[in-house]
Image (cartoon, rainbow, N blue to C red):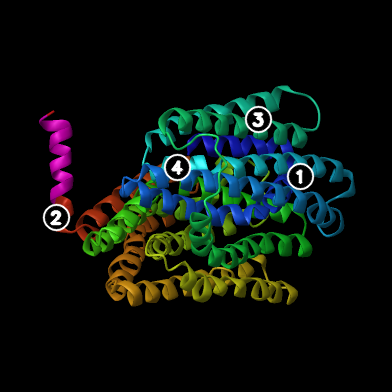
């Protein structure tokens, strides 16, 4: 997290707010074309985990080879679409300064290469998750940190157009990481060969499972990129820089706290396949609770001292509305993290159709609402708040769906997980807030409020958040690790 925040500051400083916005706008637009890949990725993970649980090596190999062939086809389709419709949209619709259009094309083409290679390699990433070999993620996180530092070092040293250089370096690090995953899977998993055989029965099953995901993922991408494009139409790439920085904060925190959810997804499929619904429900409750506890520890001090933190992070060159966008993103994180495991539960039981038919379309409400707010000359912050309402509605719909199909205790989850943890964040912030308003802004206040926030959050979680069984487990783990080691 620390390295990511530092590198973001240097990149913003070297590129400038406008070029940073171009990188986020164009790169995000290209990545949105990989929607089909995202859909089949979840389906690939599910079917691999299913056959691993059944110890069916033959079906496992057929599943991987079929998925690999499909992803090659998707890569070809995405490449053609980007080099035709994508190029037209870049030239005709995006609000980019004419003097920076050549650099934007460089970013576009390098992002296309990165997207295509990522699509082809997706089945290998799915295999790692399905086999629950999460140690590779720890090793690759080290590689990611080293790569980011190397990119910054070279970006500072090399003369020339910094935006183009940055795009080239990002591609190089990404391709190297993909190659490492490919070599790892080839040695570790027998099914990850170079076969491109397609089994028609498996193909039909995977497409049926993923088919409804097409609709849902397109809506998700349209909503995300649509927000960036609307901001670009009403303002400039500087506003996209502010949104990009808010998304960077969200991504960095997500990488820190969603390890629980990544590890839990194949377990959900296996519990459901074995008919162990009590363990299925308990896993959703526990993983979400742990995730929200970690989120609270990070969120409380960030919300209270965000202006100072962003100033420390980015220096004086802060794009307008960055702090407001980041605050809203942090608050909405509680909604997103509460909904993540519910969506994973629906996917595990094969109810992708219902999720994408009833829940995901709600996200489309964001775009006309945001457009209307900006058309009325209201503040961009108001537009950001309006855009956060549909995710809450979607979360409630998903709770209802999971309860309907599995007898999941939705009311208990909403009260004991979502509302309770929201309340814990508010309670944890009371004492640090009182101290904050009585101190002069600066480094001393930042340290005092942050340490007090950490202590207040931990104490609140211990006494009001954890049940007796979990407290006993934690005491036992601490005793085994540090006392009786």
- Tag in front: 4 or 1: 4
Is the residue under label 1 in contact with that under label 2 (CB below 8 Å)?
no
Reading the image, the residue beneath label 1 is 108
Quarter-of-image position of residue 256: top left
Residue 21 seen by the camera: no
User: Which tag, 3 or 1, sits closer to the chain's start?
Assistant: 1
> Which of the two labelled residues, at mark 3 and mark 2, occupies the earlier sequence position?
3
Q: Which mark is residue 172?
A: 3
Pick whichever of labels 2 and 1 is earlier in the sequence. Answer: 1
Badge 4: how crowded within 10 Å, few (<14), some, or many (20+)? Answer: many
Numbered range of the magenta stretch = 472-484
What whole-number distance in Å separates the C-alpha atoms at marks 4 and 1?
35 Å
Query: Which residue is disc 4 drawn over?
Result: 61
Callout 1 crowding tier (Cα within 10 Å): few <14, some 14–19, many ≥20: many
Residue 348 sits in quarter: bottom left
Mark toward the start of the polypeptide (3 vs 4): 4
- Looking at the rendered structure, the secondary structure element under dot 4 is helix
* Residue 5 on image: x %, y %: 54, 39
Q: Nearer the viewer, residue 69 or 134?
A: 69
56 in magenta = no
Of all residues, the one furthest to the left in this rendering is 484
| Cα separation between marks 3 and 2 | 48 Å
Q: Nearer the viewer, mark 3 or mark 2?
A: 3
Q: Is residue 142 left or right of residue 53?
A: right
Frontmost residue, 132 versus 207: 207
Q: Where residue 225 appears, x then y in whole percent? A: 67, 59
Picture disc at residue 469 = 2
Crowding at mark 2 (Cα within 10 Å: few <14, some 14-19, many 20+): few
């Amino acid at each position: 997290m620390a390295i990511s925040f530092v590198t973001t500051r240097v990149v913003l400083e070297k590129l400038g707010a406008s070029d940073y916005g171009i990188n986020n706008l164009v790169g995000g637009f290209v990545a949105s074309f990989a929607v089909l890949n995202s859909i089949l990725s979840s389906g690939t993970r599910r079917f691999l985990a299913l056959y691993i649980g059944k110890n069916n090596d033959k079906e496992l190999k057929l599943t991987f080879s079929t998925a690999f062939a499909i992803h090659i086809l998707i890569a070809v389709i995405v490449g053609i679409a980007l080099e035709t419709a994508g190029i037209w949209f870049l030239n005709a619709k995006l609000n980019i300064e004419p003097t920076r259009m050549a650099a934007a094309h460089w970013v576009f083409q390098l992002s296309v290469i990165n997207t295509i290679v990522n699509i082809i390699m997706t089945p290998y990433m799915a295999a790692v998750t399905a086999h629950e070999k999460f140690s590779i993620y720890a090793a690759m996180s080290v590689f990611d940190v080293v790569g980011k530092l190397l990119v910054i070092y070279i970006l500072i040293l090399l003369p020339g157009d910094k935006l183009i250089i940055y795009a080239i370096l990002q591609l190089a690090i990404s391709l190297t990481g993909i190659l490492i995953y490919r070599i790892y899977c080839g040695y570790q998993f027998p099914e990850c060969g170079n076969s491109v055989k397609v089994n028609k029965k498996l193909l039909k099953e995977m497409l049926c499972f993923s088919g409804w995901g097409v609709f849902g993922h397109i809506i998700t991408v349209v909503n995300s990129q649509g927000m960036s494009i609307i901001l670009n139409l009403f303002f400039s790439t500087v506003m996209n820089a502010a949104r990009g920085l808010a998304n960077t904060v969200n991504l960095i925190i997500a990488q820190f706290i969603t390890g629980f959810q990544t590890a839990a997804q194949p377990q959900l499929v296996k519990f459901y396949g074995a008919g162990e619904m009590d363990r299925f429900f308990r896993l959703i409750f526990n993983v979400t609770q742990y995730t929200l506890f970690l989120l609270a520890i990070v969120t409380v001090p960030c919300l209270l001292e965000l202006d100072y933190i962003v100033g420390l992070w980015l220096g004086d060159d802060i794009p307008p509305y960055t702090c407001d966008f980041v605050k809203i993103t942090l608050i909405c994180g509680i909604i997103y993290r509460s909904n993540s495991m519910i969506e994973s539960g629906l996917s595990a039981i094969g109810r992708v159709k219902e999720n994408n038919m009833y829940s995901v379309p709600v996200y489309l409400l964001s775009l006309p609402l945001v457009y209307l707010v900006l058309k009325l000359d209201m503040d961009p912050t108001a537009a950001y708040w309006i855009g956060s309402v549909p995710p809450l509605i979607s979360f409630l719909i998903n709770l209802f769906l999971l309860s309907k199909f599995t007898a999941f205790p939705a009311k208990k989850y909403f009260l004991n997980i979502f509302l309770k943890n929201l309340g814990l964040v508010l309670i944890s912030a009371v004492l640090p807030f009182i101290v904050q308003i009585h101190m002069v802004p600066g480094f001393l206040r930042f340290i005092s409020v942050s340490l007090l926030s950490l202590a207040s959050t931990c104490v609140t979680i211990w006494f009001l958040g954890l049940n007796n069984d979990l407290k006993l487990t934690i005491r036992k783990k601490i005793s085994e690790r540090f006392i009786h080691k």
